[in-house]
Image (cartoon, grey):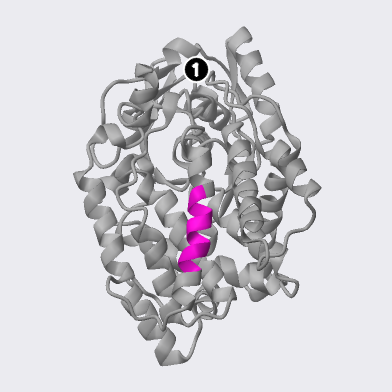
Amino acid sequence: MAISVFDLFKVGIGPSSSHTVGPMRAAATFAQALIDQQLLSQTRRVEVRLYGSLSATGVGHATDRACVMGLMGEWPDRVDPTSINARIQQLRESGRLLLAGLQDIAFNWQQDLRLLDESLPYHPNAMSLHAYGENGLLSEQTYYSVGGGFIIEAAEAASGIAPTSDVELPYDFSSAVELLALCNKHGLRVSELMMANERAWRSDADIRSGLLHIWSVMRECVEQGLRDEGILPGGLDVPRRAAKLHRSLLEIGKPNVITSTLSAMEWVNLFALAVNEENAAGGRMVTAPTNGAAGIIPAVLHYYMKFNAEASDDDVVNFFLAAAAVGILCKKNASISGAEVGCQGEVGSACAMAAAGLADVLGATPEQLENAAEIGLEHNLGLTCDPVGGLVQVPCIERNAIAAVKAINATQMALRGDGKHFISLDRVIRTMRDTGADMHDKYKETSRGGLAVSWVEC
């Protein structure tokens, strides 16, 4: 399966890539299919059924709202997040839904949107959509939201074979060993190799402009997070902290990364908090590679851009490309879905990706970059996904800040070495996969174990 950097970094909305972005894409895809099959005008009713983790934490992750918006023909990268509340309220009051933005049908929130206490095969994040006409069922499809906003249909999941494309990459790789061998054989940095692969899809200009757009969305997300104050939605009464912390840091003046390391780390914390507070509030996001871990990569890149006077747009492009190489390995050989392998697959993968991106722009060899990614992932192994109340607030927001600092430290340690180390990145990724398989389901994005239960007991 050929995976692009733009598959891992996608513009969407909060609070979750697998529980919000994926379901919205699935519902919008289903609505578009009704148009393509010339069934839209015959449709009188639609029903959404959510299973497994999508059902268990669906309300907290706004899965129900995402599905409805998708049915209305909205896509995660285009929908205006500020319009959603009013449109949902109008639908609830009127009981009418404009399917695909074209066909007016009745919609009963309680009857037509079902959260079921059962699971489907192949993946914990499952949903099925059904369209009915006057004489019964017109169309149905089951989708699996497999992390990072990726969705696959039931037939693809049942085949056990990852969906492929006709794209042939000049430097295809499925392991870190293969990646390093290709870099050494052709004298390429990891970011250079990734750039060559991306050319299989688009031109240099399009790659560059696309990645700089991703960066602009990340920057705007941080800036919005620094402006907004108050209490995050969802009922936990978690206060936003980023704006207040920002004012505090501005008062002490511009820190120096060498003479004031602690202050610099506070800026890293700030950037991560700002992103993840926006994510928790349902704001505009970039999956990196998921929403639950969306603050780590922008926090580390903001850190580099803020404290390096010579930083440029070239560094932004190279950072994303190198980070994506590690993300591809995590997705191909394990998972980036918290519902499948726990938070190690989200925060752990993002930490490794951020370490790789930072290592590349700091001039690391491919071996040092692989070491940095390995350190970042290794020290997130076993991390459970236990969101309190099914919301990506506690412990998710602080967890991103901690992992961002961890990524920077991983890079610093790797740059002090020659790239030789005891455990390879490939072994750590396989260990993440195996650990996720061994992990009890209650620790994988169901809010039925860990901190989620501890909070209830308190």
Q: Position of residue 71 (x, y in %)?
A: 54, 29
The picture quadrant where one finds residue 104 is top right
| x 37%, y 53%: residue | 380
Q: Is residue 369 above or below residue 346?
A: below
From the viewer's perspective, is 30 left or right of 247?
A: left
Q: Is residue 29 above or below residue 267?
A: above
Asked if the magenta segment contains residue 408, the reply would be yes
Q: Position of residue 422 (x, y in %)?
A: 27, 74
Q: Position of residue 216 (x, y in %)?
A: 71, 55
Is residue 10 in view? Answer: yes
From the viewer's perspective, is 221 left or right of 253?
A: left
Depth check, front residue: 64 or 47? 64
Which residue is the extreme one toward the front?
A: 259
Q: Residues within 10 Å of mark 1 (few under 14, many from 20)?
A: some
Task: Please report the bounds of the magenta region as a residue range.
Answer: 402-411
From the viewer's perspective, is 257 left or right of 133?
A: right
Q: Quadrant of the C terminus?
A: top left
Secondary structure type for disc 1: loop
The residue pinned by badge 1 equals 44
Give, as a three-letter code, the residue at label 1.
Arg
| x 25%, y 42%: residue | 122
Is residue 199 in view? Answer: no
**What secondary structure characterizes most of the magenta part?**
helix
Q: Is residue 285 above or below residue 173?
A: above
Depth check, front residue: 226 or 160? 226
